[in-house]
Image (spheres, rainbow, N blue to C red):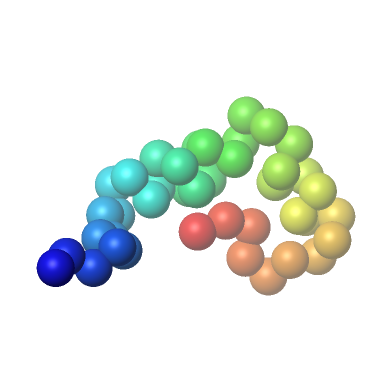
Amino acid sequence: MKRTYQPNKKRMKKKHGFFARKDSNVLASRRRKGRKRLCK
């Protein structure tokens, strides 16, 4: 049986990467909070 998590770097970047977050206000709110890492 196949495991459920099949990591895929390209898909991950597309969904959770910097450019995926740039369009919404996620980055701004995370900067305000003082996060060390803004996105994956």
Give the residue furthest to the front: 1
Could you say where residue 2 lies in the image, as x and y percent from the top left? 16, 65
**Residue 38 sits above or below residue 14 on the image:** below
The residue that appears at 26% across and 54% down in the rendered structure is: 8
**Residue 24 sits above or below residue 37 on the image:** above
Q: Is residue 21 left or right of residue 5?
A: right
Q: Quadrant of residue 28?
A: top right
Could you say where residue 1 lies in the image, as x and y percent from the top left? 14, 68
Give the residue furthest to the top: 23
Q: Is residue 20 left or right of residue 13?
A: right
**Residue 1 sits above or below residue 29 on the image:** below
Q: Is residue 29 left or right of residue 22?
A: right
Front-lying residue, 11 or 5: 5
The residue that appears at 50% across and 59% down in the rendered structure is: 40
Front-lying residue, 31 or 4: 4
The residue that appears at 52% across and 37% down in the rendered structure is: 20
Give the residue furthest to the left: 1
